Image (cartoon, coloured by chain):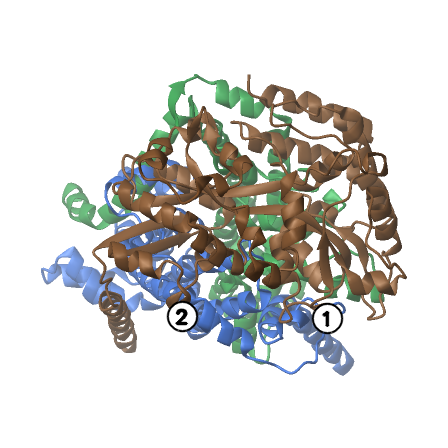
Chain colours: A green, B blue, C brown
């Protein structure tokens, strides 16, 4: 029976795997070979062993880029998760014009990165941006992002949260709606405060959705590119460069295909370590909570 | 009690106002800028009251014919990629939902792990391959690429939707002698429609806005809108920001409309999917 | 069951859209011409050739029964695409546009040497094309590209703002420029905060201009790295002082080329350095708040050098190249010949292209159309590229800019930054 069903199901899972094999896996194998060679336009690849990997790993600019990426991933993704959760709970608590509000919250998801960056650059222009002027008028500190590297990182994080909050929100909101309301009814009858209801009912039941949202956001946030490249270009003085920008520079500005390929594999390895370590930790905690 | 309810109401109103401002202000700024005359757009301090003009849209129409070709190409590519990604994901999701086993589990893990490879990596080797196949600058290349980068998420989401559909339904059909593909099309697909639409929303938004692949694998015939927009930003001759914002508004409108129309299915679909995780 | 019908409808609609769109594509008028020449260029290269009735290539197209299809990209992506296409076993592109700081020996090997063609089927009055530009496209004594456009940097200033600050004449020395820029850091009558000068921080052009104003350079055409460190230090010292005084925007480190244009158009900056060809755009009444008020002069040298060393402004040139792996090289050469002719060069110049022929500048039509033509012609006489092409040039530029930003923002003493430029760029220089 099992072999039969496997044979029957193969044609159905084949398209997905064919696509992935031909578009991602096989070309990636070529990139492995590329990473141990040296080549550029008009110059055929020559084997250099692990030189590219050593060169990239020992480049202080790469280490700084890796560190920046990790900082952005860890900060942005978690803030996004917290805000997404709050918004989801806000929606679940009952709102007027919910349909309209839902569309409003989802809207940034439809904006392409290029356009988003152009707008944010202007809104936060340190001399004349409407937001900067408003903050100044209110006597609040401004984001001096073109001068202070930390402020630049904050702006990058804000922008990436703006673009991706809808994704996190919709997954959490859908999961929250799926929690049967009689569970809350039961909690209320037991005399639980809203906070206790959140801790005992909402949080554990949202666990799996949180995992999905976090995992995909971790993977996508790790290759953050447009926000940085178009907003700060990695500046001031390369202080906000991230790994994807480093990779892009190697491949498309310096045409050093070998070190670009090596950077790519280091990036894959780093995101794998970060994501799997995280999933492991979280799974422990979620199952711990549920019991 | 009443004051408490009132203060909760007030808190909520403030939260909603902040949320609306956060989400919509930048977008409103794009649309507003597209209706301003060129020399007003970056005026300091910015003008919030002005007489709207459609001159930017007129110039867009007159000077950037390629933008409208781009819209057509984007439509074809988005429709194709969505159809391909959704059908491939649904097939796979069905198998993952109804069967178990070490082999299938491994194939799910494989789908996720493969997604760790950043898309930019495969562009280097793919360029000569696609060129040798004579597929450069065709819609097919983009359709296949976009679909591929979404089947992982798609298959996993579809599995959770299909998990919600009682097995008895397809088992009954199986006893009647129906083949898996027939069961899928006749029984599963109609019931999983909200989930399918939810996946479609993700693919549509991604395909409509994608830049990197379009940039590398198209030239003239299959050039999509994000490329034309980035060309407007290109620097030798300076940017005409009015036209750029008009183009951005036009580019944004269809997907936004699509998300508006689909938001019912998006939530319904994902809710069904989320109960089991 | 309601779901079924919705979905079916959607699917049908999808199919309908796709097929309808395909039908539209297929029914487009196909080219009547027998041959098509594919050209890889920047949008601007296409626009200056005109369209429809004013198409400068109309006669050529009829005579050759050929159509021209342009594929256009922004500058850097354009170069990347051109080299990628030329690396394939065969490409559809007959002609590409290449900028003069890219042809290294490796890159040049991908393109057709043109000396033979020039001998057997010469370009009209080839000697008229600026020899310096031709030199830039000659690699290992082989000519690989025919110059078609150049952009020389000039100093732009907003006359109205200068008057507001009580300054009657633009600067004649670098020191005066700095003085005026500091004075012009004020709030204008319109209520706009004005910054003395705006410069992009992601291009080597600007620090190089300042270094040359003191008689120094970054990398000379003979590959001497920072030949005069003191001049480079003075240049960075000047930029640093301007930033500290607010005469460069606070956002210096993230300023891009386009910002320079919008800031000038909005009266947010009084001075900038841009190619002379931007004159029309800066004064375009549709975009600019100061149409007709933005003027251009040659970038001034330091007081100590006035009358002794002329300013070597930065110039950049574009040339037409033929990939070695293209099919119809004869058609490509015929196109290049036509575009390089005196008639088309003048036509393009009137459309805003920086002409490569010396004679074009003397043409009355151009002098009347472009008030900066004479100034530009003078600046071009002593202008040079930012730096010569070599394999690691892009990396060298990025390294230099990182140190310049650190110095200008005050994160590193100028002396250390200059020392670091020399130390870090040295290993990247060609052997």
Residue assigned mark 1: B46
Which quadrant is the N terminus of chain C positioned in?
bottom left
Residue under the image location 75 percent in, 76 percent down: B7
Q: Position of residue C298 (x, y in %)?
A: 72, 47
Q: How many marks?
A: 2
- Quick one: label 1 or label 2, which is nearer the N terminus? 1
In the figure, is residue C138 to the left or right of B151?
right
Which is closer to the viewer, label 1 or label 2? 1
Left or right relative to C240: residue C298: left
Q: Residue at x 32, y 60 (%)?
A: C59
**Mark 2, residue position:** B265
Observer-nearest of A186 and B104: B104
Name the spot of residue A81 as percent of width and height, x first.
Answer: 59, 54
Q: Nearer the viewer, residue C112 or C427?
A: C112
At horizontal 33% and vertical 31% (from top left) the residue drawn is C116
Residue A218 drawn above or below residue B189: above
Distance of label 1 from label 2 (alpha carbons): 39 Å
Nearest the eye: C207 or C316: C316
């Amino acid at each position: 029976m099992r072999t039969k069903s496997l044979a029957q199901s193969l044609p159905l899972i084949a398209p997905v795997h064919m696509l992935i094999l031909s578009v991602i896996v096989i070309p990636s194998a070529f990139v492995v070979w590329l990473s141990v060679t040296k080549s550029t336009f008009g110059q055929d690849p020559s084997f250099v062993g692990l030189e590219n990997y050593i060169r990239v790993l020992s480049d202080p600019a790469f280490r700084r880029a890796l560190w920046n990426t990790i900082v952005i991933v860890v900060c942005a993704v978690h803030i996004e998760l917290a805000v997404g959760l709050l918004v989801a709970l806000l929606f679940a608590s009952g709102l007027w014009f919910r349909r309209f509000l839902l569309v409003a919250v989802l809207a940034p998801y439809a904006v392409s990165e290029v356009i988003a960056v152009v707008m944010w650059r202007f809104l936060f222009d340190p001399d004349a941006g409407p937001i900067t002027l408003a903050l100044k008028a209110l006597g609040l500190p401004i984001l001096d992002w073109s001068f202070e590297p930390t402020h630049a990182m904050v702006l990058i994080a804000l922008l990436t949260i703006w673009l991706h909050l809808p994704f996190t929100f919709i997954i959490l909101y859908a999961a929250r709606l799926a929690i049967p309301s009689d569970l809350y009814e039961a909690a209320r009858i037991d005399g639980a405060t809203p906070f206790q209801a959140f801790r005992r009912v909402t949080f554990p039941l949202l666990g799996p959705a949180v995992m999905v949202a976090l995992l995909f956001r971790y993977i996508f946030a790790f290759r953050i590119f447009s926000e940085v490249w178009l907003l700060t270009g990695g500046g001031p003085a390369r202080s906000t460069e991230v790994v994807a920008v480093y990779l892009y520079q190697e491949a498309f500005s310096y045409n050093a295909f070998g070190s670009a390929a090596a950077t790519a594999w280091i990036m894959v390895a780093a995101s794998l370590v970060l994501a799997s370590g995280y999933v492991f930790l979280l799974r422990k905690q979620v199952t711990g909570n549920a019991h | 009690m009443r004051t408490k309810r009132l203060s909760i109401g007030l808190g909520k109103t403030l939260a909603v106002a902040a949320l609306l401002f956060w989400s919509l202000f930048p977008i409103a700024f794009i649309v507003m800028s597209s209706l301003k005359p060129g020399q007003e757009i970056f005026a300091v301090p910015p003008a919030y009251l002005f007489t709207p003009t459609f001159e930017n849209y007129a110039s867009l129409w007159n000077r950037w014919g390629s933008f409208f070709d781009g819209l057509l190409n984007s439509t074809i590519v988005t429709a194709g990629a969505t159809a391909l990604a959704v059908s491939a994901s649904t097939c796979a999701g069905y198998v993952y939902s109804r069967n178990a086993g070490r082999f299938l589990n491994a194939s799910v893990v494989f789908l996720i792990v493969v997604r760790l490879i950043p898309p930019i990596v495969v562009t280097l080797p793919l360029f000569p391959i696609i060129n040798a196949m004579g597929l450069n600058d065709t819609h097919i290349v983009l359709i296949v690429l976009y679909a591929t980068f979404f089947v992982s998420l798609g298959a996993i989401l579809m599995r959770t939707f299909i998990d919600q559909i009682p097995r008895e339904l397809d088992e009954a059909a199986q006893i009647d002698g129906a083949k898996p593909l027939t069961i899928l099309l006749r029984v599963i697909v109609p019931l999983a429609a909200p989930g399918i639409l939810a996946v479609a929303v993700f693919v549509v938004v991604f395909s409509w806005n994608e830049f990197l692949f379009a940039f590398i694998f198209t030239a003239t015939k299959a050039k999509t809108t994000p490329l034309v927009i980035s060309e407007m930003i290109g620097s030798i001759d300076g940017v005409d920001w009015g036209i750029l914002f008009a183009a951005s508004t036009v580019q944004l409108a269809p997907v936004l409309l699509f998300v508006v129309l689909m938001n019912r299915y998006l939530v319904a679909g994902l809710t069904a999917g989320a109960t089991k995780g | 069951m309601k779901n079924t019908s919705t979905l079916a409808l959607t699917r049908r609609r999808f199919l309908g859209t796709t097929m309808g769109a395909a039908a539209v594509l297929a029914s487009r008028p196909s080219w009547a011409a027998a041959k098509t020449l594919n050209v890889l260029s920047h949008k601007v290269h296409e626009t200056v050739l005109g369209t429809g009735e004013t198409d400068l290539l109309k006669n050529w197209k009829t005579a050759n029964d050929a159509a021209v299809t342009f594929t256009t990209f922004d500058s850097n992506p354009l170069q990347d695409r051109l080299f990628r296409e030329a690396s394939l076993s065969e490409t559809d592109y007959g002609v590409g546009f290449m900028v003069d700081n890219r042809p290294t020996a490796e890159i040049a090997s991908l393109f057709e040497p043109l000396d033979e063609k020039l001998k057997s089927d010469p370009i009209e009055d080839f000697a008229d094309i600026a020899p310096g530009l031709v030199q830039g496209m000659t690699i290992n004594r082989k000519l690989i590209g025919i110059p078609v456009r150049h952009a020389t940097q000039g100093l732009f200033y907003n006359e109205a703002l200068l008057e507001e600050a009580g300054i009657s004449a633009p600067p004649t020395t670098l020191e005066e420029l700095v003085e005026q820029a500091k004075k012009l850091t004020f709030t204008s009558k319109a209520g706009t905060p004005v910054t003395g000068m705006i410069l992009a921080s992601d291009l080597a052009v600007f620090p190089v201009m300042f270094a040359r104003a003191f008689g120094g350079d970054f990398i000379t055409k003979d590959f001497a790295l920072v030949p005069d460190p003191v001049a480079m230090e003075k240049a960075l010292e000047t930029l640093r002082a301007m930033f500290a005084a607010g005469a460069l925007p606070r956002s210096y480190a993230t300023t891009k080329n386009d910002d320079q244009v919008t800031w000038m158009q909005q009266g947010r900056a009084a001075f900038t350095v841009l190619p002379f060809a931007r004159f029309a755009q800066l004064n375009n009444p549709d975009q600019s708040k100061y149409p007709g008020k933005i003027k251009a002069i040659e970038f001034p040298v330091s007081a100590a050098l006035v009358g002794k060393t002329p300013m070597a402004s930065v110039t950049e040139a574009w040339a037409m190249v033929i990939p070695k792996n293209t099919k119809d090289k004869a058609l490509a050469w015929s196109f290049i010949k036509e575009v390089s002719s005196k008639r088309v060069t003048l036509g393009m110049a009137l459309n805003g292209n920086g002409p490569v022929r010396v004679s074009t500048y003397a043409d009355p039509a151009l002098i009347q159309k472009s008030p900066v033509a004479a100034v530009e012609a003078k600046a071009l006489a002593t202008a040079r590229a930012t730096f010569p092409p070599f394999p690691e040039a892009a990396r060298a530029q990025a390294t230099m800019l990182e140190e310049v930003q650190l110095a200008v923002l005050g994160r590193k003493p100028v002396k250390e930054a200059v020392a670091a430029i020399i130390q870090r760029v040295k290993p990247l220089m060609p052997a």
